[in-house]
Image (tube, grey):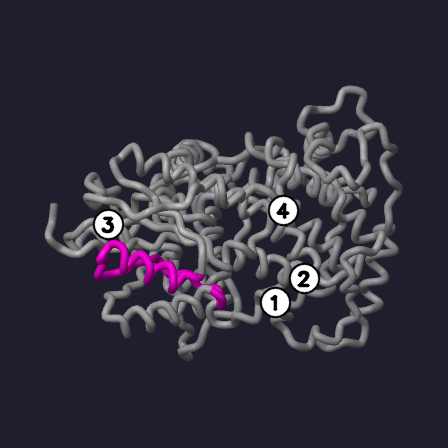
Amino acid sequence: MSDSKPTLLWLRRDLRLSDHPAWAAALKAGGPVIPVFIHDDTVASLGAAPKWRLGLGLGKLAETLDEKGSRLILRKGEALQVLRDLIEETGAGAVHWSRLYDPDAIERDKAVKSALKEDGIDAVSHAGHLMFEPWTVETKDGGYYKVYTPMWRAVKDRDVAEPLKAPTDLRPPESWPGTDDLKDWRMGAAMDRGADIVLPYQTIGEEAAQDRLAWFIDDPINDYNDARDKPAVNGTSGLSENLSLGEISPAQCWHAGMRKLNMGSKGAEAWLKELVWREFAYHLIYHTPQIATRNWREKWDEFPWNEDGDTPEVMAWKQGRTGIKFVDAAMREMYVTGRMHNRARMIVASYLTKHLMTHWRVGQAWFDDHLTDWDIASNAMGWQWAAGCGPDASPYFRIFNPETQLEKFDKKGNYTRAWIVEGQDEPSESALSYFDAIPRSWDIGPDDAYPEPVVGLSEGRQRALDAYKGRSF
């Protein structure tokens, strides 16, 4: 055992061992390494589904560390105080962590780093959540990118470091500090009965994420260009939940995709572009943090959106009972699986913000609570893109027609049959599961008739266009 002081490895959204620069640096210091996760205000404020999914990820990582002779220390409280307590208990001389880029995390981490350095502790942050640090990607004028395509061109030929291998020696201390019991945190309390329904659809932990990547790269990536838009087809990587929690790194995905691209895969470049779309979201939230809470384009501040999330129309949207099948199928998919197909996300977001003239923040908050692959940057940018008020947004006058979209991308009706019970003599198990996942207070059952549209598609479209008329966006 080394005589060097222990190092605290403060884990957040980097729940893996491989390609983990902070972990590698902590081990390189030479002393014991103590991994710790802190349940602070940023965790307490998570919505029901992402908090539950985080708990599952922590449980899986704890199991992995136990198997390898290490341990995950769990503590609840304000981050700086918890770290100071652990430093006092263990004699640690350094704290390492992976960077996050949303405004709350940046504010917290800056304060922690400054305070620890004043205490004489070596406090070091590392890359790992992104491939391209936001401040390293600049336009020719030295600014940040506001449009995706030029950013893609700027980074597509950049070198991305080869992923680091998982360490074989985790260098545990001779004695461990005390730890909370994960069960006592009740991370899934707000999920209620929905947890049992959603659980089978989760891909939990680093090993499962790597297996999923291997499956996708082996074959589905070849048809990604076409299959990614078909919600009834298992044609995407499904790694969004794992990327969100850092159970896999974007660099690992990038290199796997690049190898396939160099082998001539037609779908590989499209998938690599999606990885950079995620980078673009973090590029924006870093440079323009207001994107998470306010209209990115200030001219939209006066737009007459409804901001009441409890109107009958909005409640129908939330419940997957708008009478518009593509919208309803997508919302029900989210309640059963914790995720929603990307094409479907565009449709439900466009329908809420345009046909129902409801503020994107209402939809953002609902997704914040229900997505197990929740990602603060991607969710904010996606909603603002759909609403028309964000960077590189869908033009305000572009209003998706859910019926024609369904005809184009689900001609045989497989997607709607998978998620909508009403009208089927023998509905699928997935469609029936919706009624077991939703709150009992909704008082909705499979024998209820399918609703008439709460707003007609033509009517809703015209209402939105009338509201846009004469405005300068």
Q: Badge 3: few (under 14), some or many (20 or more) residues near its Cα, within 10 Å?
A: many
- Residue receiving disc 4: 370
Residue visible at 30% across and 68% down in the picture: 116
On the image, the x and y values in percent for residue 423 come to 83, 28
Number of numbered discs visible in the structure rendering: 4
Q: Distance of mark 4 from mark 3, alpha carbons?
A: 35 Å
Q: Residue at x 37, y 64 (%)?
A: 133
Q: Which residue is mark 1?
A: 293
Tag of residue 361? 2
Say which label, 4 or 3, has the lower sequence index: 3
* Nearer-the-camera pick, 131 or 257: 131
Q: Is residue 400 left or right of residue 67?
A: right
Q: Residue at x 67, y 65 (%)?
A: 388
**How far is the residue under mark 2 from the one under mark 3?**
41 Å
Q: Is residue 445 above or below residue 246?
A: above
What residue is pinned by disc 3?
33
Q: Amino acid at mark 1?
A: Thr
In the displayed structure, does residue 361 sit left or right of residue 80?
A: right
Q: Position of residue 156 (x, y in %)?
A: 39, 57
Instruction: Give the spatial CA distance, label 4 vs label 2.
Output: 14 Å
Q: CB atoms at circles 2 and 3 under 8 Å apart?
A: no
For the magenta stretch, what is the residue range? 78-104
